[in-house]
Amino acid sequence: MAVDEIQNAADGAEAHAAGTAESLGSKRYPVAPGVRLNVRSGPGTNYQLIRVLPIGASVPINCQKPGESVTGPYGTTNIWDCIGNGQFVSDAFVQTGSDGYVTIRCS
């Protein structure tokens, strides 16, 4: 394989990785109507409160992980959505259209 073919393959791989990262973080999901949602430092209500999202907020879901079971407008679930670095919200308050995982699991 020629040097320029190797570089083109590497460029293509980088573009694919960037596109995948964008597609994972670009979709936003609405928080339940009328809810000011707590953002926690981990997947449970015992974790530190970081901030409160305003009514009408929508969130990206970077990854999801199991944690404390919570009941909200969209049922009871132990799935927590990572919406930013070290920022988690209960999936019971986020309209994903699914009772299960909608993206990758957090590592």
Image (cartoon, rainbow, N blue to C red):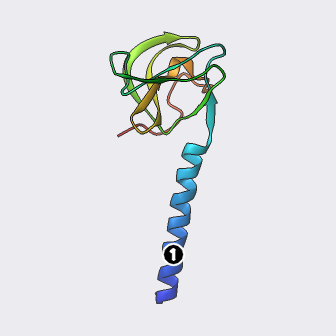
Q: Residue at (33%, 16%) from the top-left corner? A: 46
Residue 48 percent across, percent down from the top left: 35, 22
Quadrant location, the C terminus? top left
Check disc 1 and report its element: helix, strand or loop. helix
Number of numbered discs on residues = 1
Q: Which residue is mark 1?
A: 9
- Compared to residue 28, the image places residue 77 above or below, namely above
Query: 91 and 1: which one is in front?
Result: 91
- Compared to residue 82, the image places residue 22 above or below, namely below
Q: Residue at (55%, 44%) from the top-left corner? A: 25
- Compared to residue 48, the image places residue 17 above or below, namely below
Query: 95 and 2: which one is in front?
Result: 95
Classify 10 Å Cα crowding around label 1: few (below 14), some (14-19), many (20 and above): few
- Compared to residue 106, the image places residue 76 above or below, namely above
Residue 68 percent across, percent down from the top left: 37, 17
Q: Is residue 81 left or right of residue 27?
A: left
Q: Residue furthest bottom?
A: 2
Residue 93 percent across, percent down from the top left: 55, 18
In which image quadrant can residue 53 be found? top right
Q: Residue at (49%, 10%) from the top-left corner? A: 71
**Which amino acid, mark 1?**
Ala
Residue 90 percent across, percent down from the top left: 47, 21
